[in-house]
Image (cartoon, rainbow, N blue to C red):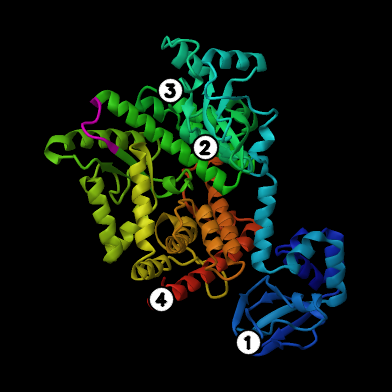
Amino acid sequence: MQPEHHEFLDFLRRHPPFDQLPDDSLEQAVSTLDVAYFKAGTPILDFGAPVDALYIIRSGAVEVLRRSGELYNRLSEGGIFGEFGLLRAGKVRFPVRALEDTLVYLLPAAEFLRLFEQHDYFADFVEVEDRTRLRQAVARREDANDLLSAPVQSLLHRAPLLVAPDTAAQAVALQMSAEVVSAALVVDGASGRMQGIVTDRDIRDRLVCEGLAYDSPVTAIMTPDPICADSDQLVFEAMLTMLKANVHHLPVMRKNQPQGVVELADIIRHESQNSLFLVNSIHRQQSAEELAALLPDVQACFQRMVNEDANSHMIGTALAVIGRSFKQRLLELAEERLGPPPVPYCFVALGSMARDDQTLVTDQDNAMILDDSFEPALHDGYFSRLAAFVSDGLNQCGYPYCSGGIMATNPEWRKRLSDWRLTFTQWIEQPTPQFLLNSSVFFDLNGVWGELRWAEDLYDMIVSKAGQHPRFLACMARNAVLRTPPLGFFKDFVMETDGRHSNSINIKRRGTAPLNDLIRVHALAVGSTSLNAFSRLHDVIDAGILPPGRGQDLRDALEFIAMVRIRHQALDLDTGQEPDNNVEPENLSEFERKHLKDAFQILSNAQKFLTYRYTPNRAG
């Protein structure tokens, strides 16, 4: 091999799609390479001109343009261009010009086509555009996980036991025993509507222990209108429904007709991350100190999910359920210590816990909704102590105090329900900078304890009012583009430059947070009542306000950036470091570097569209 070929070989081995080629094939390709040089500002490829080689940038930078002259992409060292023309009649589809003095390697068309035909990875890489390539990377992760892809109906192995509302309770118990099931569904024979569910526990607690007559109708001991799952829901979603509602039996429905009942044991057999066991353990602890001792279990649960290829939605939702469970148990313990509350209240989770996208690195954002009969002089002492107990306990359990004071311990965030309505109305109708900042936190809210319907009612009010105020949406859109993705002029990563995290990328501040911000604006505009970003995107796509394909692009970008963040935190745990949101580029594989740049470019384009759509004369 000639000396320059060694240099060619070393260079190509560091850059996709050549980095995955076997040595013999790569060496053959290297033997065909030629070299060309272009001065800054000169054209390299003109639209419609013949193209007979793949261009590989050795040094310098180029601009790839659309035929209209609009910028399509910028490429630097390791970038390739000309592939679209080679795959389509040998004519240039995207003109290219040198931004600076540029040295390129030329891979002849015949050798390019040989690699394309013989190596799937090479073909996949060059055949699709950045956003499609990113979609394939995300899809491969999803396909690898059974929890994500299996529908809940796959857990059903028999038809449900159906009983009429007037059936005697003892007769239902005998049927359950005979058919060896632990639950029966109470269905009205005339309408076919399911009225309730009765379980072994109901027979024990509501029939035997209460001393009811055994011939009492089953409606006397059933749970009316139970929480259900649709048959096409995923196993993981059914698991989370059971966790959130603390139920052991989940009727499965198709077109309002019962198909079967999933039991907790079915989910446990299917569930591989053991988050169910952890949540169950949380609710058995008797003090904040005992709860804090479970932190290693939380970390182990997180690592198992990452190692078993769970996606970001699964991990974020599971950790949010775990976080809510800590709050719920602490609130139970607080009420045991302080006595029953003097007036009804709702404890609210904000931010990532409300959106079901929590990771290990999080703080506590929470607030309290109080009944309108609340009188500060009479009642606030109780709620102040309760909030302090919960907040201190969360800090012990690995959820640090919010540095911005967005906690129920702050009297500003303990309000009557009517006062919250007035506050949110003011924020929407008078969008000052501080109100907009508050909105970006408080407009992701979810009740975790107490009068949960109050949180739902408040969120419904937020969605209704926000969609009626174009100026508010325009202001939120301007705020949503303040945090830009960390891409430089040549699509290189822009690093943090201060503090102990210099020369790293804050993947939350520059990635997942701005994505959540812009998705929230679109969701409010279309009246989506969803909280999770992926669910919001589904609603936004259905509303048709995005250019074709861009909603799916955003979903892929969010998934990939979130998983880089999650894997980095798992790596920190593996190496004995404190997990954080700062990713060092040297810890990224070439695969991650490439697709992370693709994802950040999608975010950048989405921010530009957001600014355009919600200008004051267009918003709404």
From the viewer's perspective, is 36 left or right of 180?
A: right
Residue depth check, mark 4 versus mark 3: number of the one nearer the observer: 4
Q: What range of the chain is rendered magenta? A: 338-345
* Residue 213 seen: yes
From the viewer's perspective, is 70 left or right of 479?
A: right
Mark 4: few/some/many CA within 10 Å (<14, 14-19, 20+):
some
Magenta part, dominant SS = loop
Expressed as whole percent of the image width and height from the top left, the position of residue 123 reads: 79, 65
Q: CA distance from mark 1 to mark 4?
A: 25 Å
Disc nearer the start of the sequence (1/3): 1
Label 4 sits on a secondary structure element that is loop
Q: CA distance from mark 2 to mark 4?
A: 39 Å
Label 1 sits on a secondary structure element that is loop
Disc nearer the start of the sequence (4/3): 3
Q: Which residue is mark 3?
A: 284
* Residue in view at x 62 percent, y 16 percent: 175
Type of amino acid under label 1: Ser
Disc nearer the start of the sequence (1/4): 1
Discs 1, 2 touching: Cβ within 8 Å:
no
Discs 4, 3 touching: Cβ within 8 Å:
no
Q: CA distance from mark 1 to mark 2?
A: 51 Å
Which label sits on residue 241?
Answer: 2
